[in-house]
Image: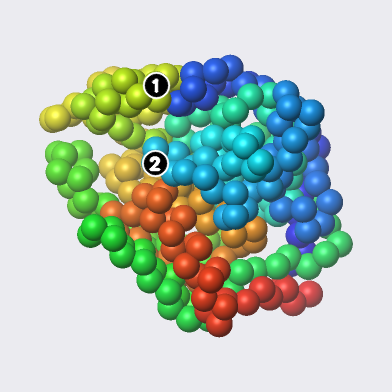
Amino acid sequence: MNQATISKDIQLNGVGLHTGVEVSLTLRPAPEDTGYVFVRTDLDNFEIPASVEYISHCSYATTLMRRGVVLSTCEHLLSALRGSGVDNCFIELDNIEIPIMDGSSEDFVDLLTAVGTLEQNAPRRFFRVLKTVEFEENGRRMSIEPSDKYEIDCVIDFSHPFINRQAYHFVFENGSFGEQIASARTFGFTHEIEMLRKANLALGGSLHNAIVLTPDGMLNESPLRFGDEFVRHKILDIIGDFALLGMPVLGKITAERSGHAVHAALMSKILKTEDAWEIVEAVR
Ligand SMILES: [Zn+2]
């Protein structure tokens, strides 16, 4: 089990969910031990590594910042890269925000599958959890504990007839991300969207890139992709945020009503707990 990169460049265009700006994105192969590195081609190729240390804020999406340069809404693309078994990749973009595509990771995964991965010479490294670490705040709870696989147990609870309580247990295996998680779309509520628009957010949001819920139904005319699409999208977000640890996890994440801020808090807590994790290399 060696590290992998993409076998050739991938180019795509889209619009940012929150900024509404057009962005051109190119994924390029990267050498061993690079991880994921964002490159702002509009700012002299300024690099922002996808790392917990650069998380700047995470209210409605995960935003990174290095020396004042911002990179917004990275989670769905990082989820697709991690979910497709890519360890190393340069992500070039000419604006501030990763394109939202259809609100899921499906387009990214389709493009990654089409070009395929290239096995590299260095063994794959894992972030292995040695001890349970928990974070809890205002009824939101998340923990990470030892496991010989990467697995996620997630529960969400929204008082809406389409959601209520949804639970899902996801195990990372060959192809499982593409089949179970990648196409689950982001969602929002009409009352929340008015508030976001007033704050100059969700400017690129539409029924083409989100499930928009009204108090008793949804605005989208096409059906949900899964009955439990909402909890599957939460898992998509968790995988994308935890990609900021820089390598795949060997551990079990349990999340109850979590969100980007809770993900970030748990990651920094485990990183600070030195005896709770180690980096291991795959046995060849
Ligand atoms: Zn999301």
The label shown at residue 200 is 1
Pick whichever, 158 or 53, lies toward us.
Answer: 53
In this picture, residue 164 sits left or right of residue 265 = left
Q: Residue 27, how many percent across, how many down? A: 72, 35
Q: Is mark 1 within 8 Å of ligand 1?
A: no
- The residue under the point 45% across, 39% down is 61
Badge 2 amino acid: Ser
Badge 1 amino acid: Asn
In this picture, residue 259 sits left or right of residue 191 = right
- The residue under the point 13% across, 30% down is 216
Pick whichever, 282 or 177, lies toward us.
Answer: 282
From this viewpoint, is residue 117 visible? no
Q: Which residue is mark 2?
A: 59
Pick whichever, 203 or 165, lies toward us.
Answer: 203
**Above-or-below relation of 139 to 199:** below
How far apart are the alpha carbons under marks 1 and 2?
13 Å
